[in-house]
Image (cartoon, rainbow, N blue to C red):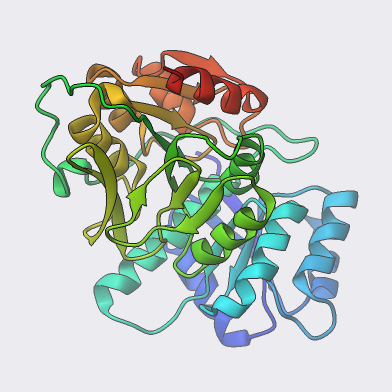
């Protein structure tokens, strides 16, 4: 099997060493070089172009976003931005995603052993996912298939299959991963102010989802906020699951819906997990829900989308042509979970049609 060749760029020698060790622990990854700044990285790339670059944001000779923009203009390569856990830097990372980066990871840090193992797993999975990302002039590589992992059973029991009675309101659940930040922006910007309530799981590290929600809130007619435990799902509002240590689920309280934000293990290699959100929608909303799975690596959400469809929800998957990584939608389509496969530009319209009374 061909290895994913990675170039690590960071001005900290200890971070370069740690990233190299973490990535090299995966037999499917080869670190071909570690550079202290973009100038040294450019010299390496003259000899060998990597499959993926991990790129620090703050560097003394040239900042990461300037290098990213030049790279995308001259030699497009999938780039994963690497940052410290500081909310002040989240806006910069969102600018990097807009400039062409395909994902964001947190720099390795000292912590509880279990959390360290999970963090290292997420770094490796993100880098391998980035290798399949569609950037200018490149197409995704073949899917290597999912590894053994926990399902949503670790957080919620399976749906009962009992049909839910209709309410006066519908709820929309959306799942996305690699490439999802810009895709979600396009969908949410197209929605009117009275759109049905939306709950979103976008795979991002902790602290970045809050800045992402704030950024979308300033661009969209609907209100967008990072979900908090007990938040009401209501018309004109989108709730984005907080990244990091908790799952976000949909619960029903009488005729209204709220979100529950709870700790739990990684599910489908992710936390928050799309499978967990979708299963909670199947259990608690049934035919009152619409499920949408968008661009992303792996199969998180595919099983949950099928559970939503079985429970009576309308379900959609983003098509291959408009997906940065056609992993999650592909798996959902293969399972027969999607009622309809649609391009990114039509998702908002289909969402509104499916929730119209």
Along the horizontal axis of the image, is 352 left or right of 100? left
The vertical placement of 160 against 111, above or below, is: above
**Residue 285 or 235: which is nearer the viewer?**
235
**Residue 4 or 53: which is nearer the viewer?**
53
Along the horizontal axis of the image, is 309 left or right of 355? left
The answer, for residue 99, to whether it is visible in the render is yes
Instruction: Give the residue drawn at x 59%, y 73%.
Output: 83
Q: Position of residue 211 (x, y in %)?
A: 57, 66
Instruction: Give the residue drawn at x 39%, y 67%.
Output: 119
Q: Position of residue 125 (x, y in %)?
A: 45, 52
The answer, for residue 202, to whether it is visible in the render is no
Q: Quadrant of residue 347?
A: top right
Instruction: Give the residue drawn at x 52%, y 24%.
Output: 352
The vertical placement of 94 against 144, above or below, is: below
Along the horizontal axis of the image, is 305 left or right of 163? right
Instruction: Give the residue drawn at x 79%, y 75%.
Output: 63
Along the horizontal axis of the image, is 242 left or right of 140? left
């Amino acid at each position: 099997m061909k290895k994913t060749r990675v170039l690590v760029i960071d001005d900290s020698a200890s971070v370069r060493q740690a990233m190299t060790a973490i990535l090299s622990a995966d037999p499917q990854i080869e670190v071909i070089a570690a550079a202290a700044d973009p100038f040294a990285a450019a010299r390496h790339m003259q000899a060998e172009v990597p499959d993926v670059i991990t790129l620090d944001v703050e560097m003394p000779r040239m900042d990461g976003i300037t290098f990213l923009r030049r790279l995308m203009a001259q030699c497009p390569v999938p780039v994963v931005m690497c940052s410290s856990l500081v909310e002040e830097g989240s806006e910069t990372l969102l600018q990097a995603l807009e400039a062409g980066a395909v994902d964001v990871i947190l720099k390795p840090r000292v912590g509880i052993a279990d959390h360290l193992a999970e963090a290292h797993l997420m770094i490796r999975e993100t880098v391998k996912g980035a290798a399949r990302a569609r950037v200018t002039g490149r197409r995704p590589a073949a899917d290597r298939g999912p590894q053994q992992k926990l399902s949503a059973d670790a957080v919620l029991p399976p749906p009962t299959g009992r049909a839910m009675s209709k309410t006066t309101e519908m709820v929309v659940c959306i799942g996305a991963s690699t490439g999802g930040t810009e895709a979600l922006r396009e969908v949410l910007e197209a929605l009117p102010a009275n759109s049905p309530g939306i709950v979103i799981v976008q795979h991002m590290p902790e602290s970045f989802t809050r800045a992402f929600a704030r950024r979308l809130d300033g661009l969209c007619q609907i209100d967008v906020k990072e979900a908090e435990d007990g938040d009401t799902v209501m018309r004109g509002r989108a709730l984005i699951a907080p990244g990091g240590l908790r799952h976000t689920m949909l619960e029903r309280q009488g005729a209204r819906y709220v979100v529950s934000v709870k700790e739990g293990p990684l599910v489908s290699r992710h936390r928050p997990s799309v499978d967990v959100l979708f299963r909670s929608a199947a259990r608690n909303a049934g035919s009152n829900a619409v499920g949408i799975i968008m661009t992303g690596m792996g199969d998180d959400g595919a099983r949950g989308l099928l559970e939503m469809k079985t429970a009576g929800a309308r379900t959609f998957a983003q098509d291959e042509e408009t997906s940065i990584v056609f992993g999650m939608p592909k798996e959902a389509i293969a399972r027969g979970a999607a009622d309809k496969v649609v391009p990114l530009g039509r998702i908002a319209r289909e969402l509104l049609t499916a929730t119209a009374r």
